[in-house]
Amino acid sequence: MTATARGKRTPTELDSGDAPELSRGLENRHLQLIAIGGAIGTGLFLGSGRTISLAGPSILLVYLIIGFFLFFVMRAMGELLLSNLAYKSFADFATDLIGPWAGFYIGWTYWMCWVVIGIADTTAITGYLAEWFPNQPKWIPALVVVVLLTGLNMVAVKIFGEMEFWFAMIKIVTIVALILVGGYLAITSFQPPVAGAPPASVAHLWDRGGFFPTGFMGFVAGFQIAIFSFQGIEMAGTAAAETANPEHNLPRAINSIPARVIIFYVLALGVIMSVQPWDLIDPDKSPFVEMFSFIGVLIAFHIVNFVVLTSAASSANSGVFSTSRVMYGLAREKNAHPVFAKLSDRHIPRNALILTAFCISPSIILVMLSDSVMDAFSLVAGVSSVLYLSVWGLILVSYLCYLRKYPERHEESNFKMPAGRFMSWAGLVFFALIVVMLAMNKESRMALLAAPVWVLFLALMYRALRETRSTAVPIDYDAERIREAEKVRQHVDEYHANKAAQKNRRGSDKAQNLDDESHDEIQKEDGE
């Protein structure tokens, strides 16, 4: 009996007609750098100044703890996505494993998270540009960012991949250079040209009030914006539906997370606090930019300001990409208006991109009304952190349901989550503790109170869309599992065939050039 006969439809049937399917236009190098770029966002470059002021050097432990648990969330996500390549997003596997309501909630909430992140990043870009153009009206760069990123994402998914590749490369080179320079300054006890500043030393991590200088509550307060720093770490999973070989590329991207956390968070911030003691860092500025100003290298200040500007643009670019793909997935399930399920001739969810631009536009008003860019950033970061916790939590719940519903797929998996059942429960307990920590902090408590309002709004919208959903025939993910696996194998075979053909062409061209050179030499000898 076919999927259609059983009353279900396949993604092929859904997408047949006017709209083509999403294109698998991302290569391995794109996915690896997208994953790295997702781990190095605006929360690290701009928000770390606020977290350092709250927690002091203990912020390094905060990042390690969060990174530890999120690694297992990403391993759970990776196993789920690879267990059935018909899953295109979190909403897909939540719908299949938990139920339609879960797919509806996680899809819309993840979409809202990235809308909020887009607002935060646009706000951050405005702040970075103010360092160079203090008299420039704030709404101008905000408007340019929204229009430019939307337009670039309209072209092709490979454009997004290339942009993220180079954005991430800039961030990696800069952070590695910062670690090397800062490490050298700390080892040589460099004396900053600032009155009252002590020589650079690793000892600053514990000799200025201890490793926990603000006490336990300060340590707890550091989790709010630190959580925001990790938002986007799951971008590899969002992009996996458009990469040519997810079974090979996705595990590599996820397994590199621990190294990324240690290098880009712990080492980078440890070096910064060794050169510029934590209590001398301005919480309203980026410590990455301020460190070079602190040591008197003004040209480096401008270079790093450009880098953190590109970092914010990278994160905003990821937000535009993610929201459009999530909205496309929601529309496929009739959890959003069907107009957002339409793809352009370039395989781009154009209508969803236009909606994204419209929803990020309030950042233009926000930067005009707020006196402090950091205050505006902290407000939206808090809201996004609360929503993201529920998304990560539902990924773990989906994994537990997967273990119960498809134990044979878990046994067959080549990318099993380590200690899957135990670490899923441990992660859920950790997220619950984070919510308690957020409730204890005055700034984040307001963001926490906004969460029930969002849940109520979704409940009303879920009920309002009841008739629309009743006309939708559920996608048969089981039927599509084999078809999608075969499609990926075909993509991989074509990719390797093209590479081999290119290699052969290069070899033939080289051989032809050698033959031509030999022929010329013979003619020259004959002439002599």
Image (spheres, grey):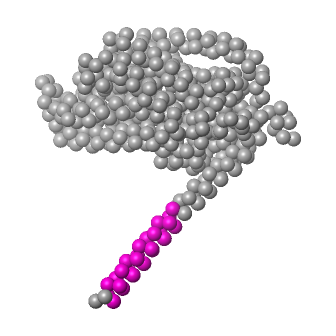
* Residue 279 in view, yes or no: no
Q: Magenta-highlighted stretch: main secondary structure?
A: helix
At horizontal 73% and vertical 41% (from top left) the residue drawn is 480
Q: State the residue at coordinates (52%, 11%).
A: 450
Please indicate whether residue 338 sits to the left or right of residue 478 in the image: left
Tell me what residue is drawn at x 39 percent, y 21 percent.
Answer: 142
- Residue 483: percent from left, percent from top: 72, 46
Q: Does the magenta portion include 522?
A: yes
Quadrant showing the C terminus: bottom left
Q: Residue furthest front?
A: 527
Asked if residue 357 is positioned above or below residue 181 in the image, the reply reads above
Judging depth in this view, the residue of 141 and 195 nearest the camera is: 141
> x and y percent of residue 369 in the render?
37, 10
From this view, report whether residue 528 is shown above or below residue 163: below
Residue 298, quarter of picture: top left
Residue 429, by quadrant, is top right
Instruction: Give the image location of residue 136, x and y in percent.
Output: 28, 19
Q: Which of 507 and 305 lies nearest the eye of the viewer?
A: 507
Please say if 493 is above or below 513: above
Residue 45: x percent and y percent?
35, 29
Question: What's the residue at 32%, 35% (across, down)?
Answer: 307
Q: Is residue 317 left or right of residue 105?
A: left
Q: Quadrant of residue 80?
A: top right
Task: Give the mark count.
Answer: 0
Q: Quarter of the image containing the N terminus?
A: top right
Position of 16 compared to 230: left or right? right
Q: Which residues are magenta?
A: 502-526
Task: Give yes or no for residue 388 being in the magenta stretch.
Answer: no
